[in-house]
Amino acid sequence: MNNSTLNTLLKDYERKRELANLNFEKQKSNFYHLHPELADLKYKLGKLALDISKAVLHGDSELEKKLKIEFNNLTSEKENLLKTISIPPGALAPLYECNICEDTGFTKYDNGKSTLCNCIKQKLFDIDFNKSNIRKFT
């Protein structure tokens, strides 16, 4: 394997990921325009998440519990709304070619280490195989 080949592939992966994220942002913007009540729930959930973080930092466990209950209720409301308008929960996420690495080319482990994803390993293998001039005889 050649470093320039890997670098080229990683740049391709970066472009694919950016394109998937750009397409998702357009789709999400359009979706929230069509369903403003969902955009409102998203805003409220984000605000609650921030408020929960503040309660944790201040050590206010009672407020934290109350906010978490409210957060869970709003999450359920959002899920019900998505069902009502026939939108699967995964539709509000970018569509990557590889769901394992999300088009980064790397998989991350709980210990913080990362390794090349199988999808990029396969592409590297395919490139090396094609360079070998091995032909399939029939």
Image (cartoon, helix red, strand yellow):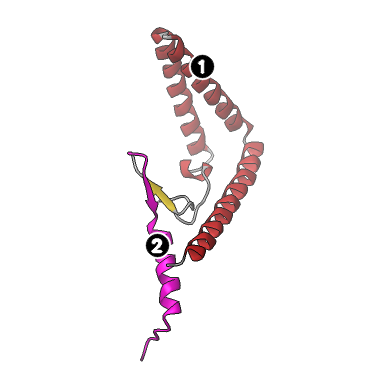
Q: Which of 72 and 115 is in front in this view?
A: 115
What amino acid does circle 2 point to? Lys
Instruction: Find residue 100 and report its horizontal and vertical position in percent.
Output: 40, 51
Q: How far apart are marks 2 and 1 (CA)?
A: 43 Å
Looking at this view, name the residue that lies furthest to the front. 3
How many labels sit on residues? 2
Q: Is residue 25 left or right of residue 92?
A: right
Name the residue tied to disc 2: 121
Q: Which type of secondary structure does the marked residue at label 1 adopt?
A: helix
Q: Residue at x 43, y 60 (%)?
A: 120
Looking at this view, name the residue that lies furthest to the bottom. 138
Are there few (<14), some (14-19), or many (20+) residues within 10 Å of tag 2?
Answer: some
Instruction: Find residue 16 and report its horizontal and vertical position in percent.
Output: 56, 56
Q: Which of 138 and 86 is in front in this view?
A: 138
Q: Which type of secondary structure does the marked residue at label 2 adopt?
A: helix
Magenta stretch: give its range. 111-138
Q: In this view, does 133 lie to the left or right of 34?
A: left
Name the residue tied to disc 1: 51
Q: Nearer the viewer, residue 93 or 80?
A: 93
The N terminus lies in quadrant = bottom left
Q: Which of marks 2 and 1 is nearer the N terminus?
A: 1
Q: Which residue is drawn at 45% across and 78% down?
A: 131
Q: Residue at x 40, y 69 (%)?
A: 125
Q: Which residue is drawn at 56% across and 27% down?
A: 41
Residue 74 painted magenta: no
- The answer to whether one can see residue 76 in this image is yes
What amino acid does circle 1 point to? Asp
Instruction: Find residue 43 and report its horizontal and vertical position in percent.
Output: 58, 26
Q: Which of 118 and 76 is in front in this view?
A: 118
Are there few (<14), some (14-19), or many (20+) residues within 10 Å of tag 1?
Answer: some
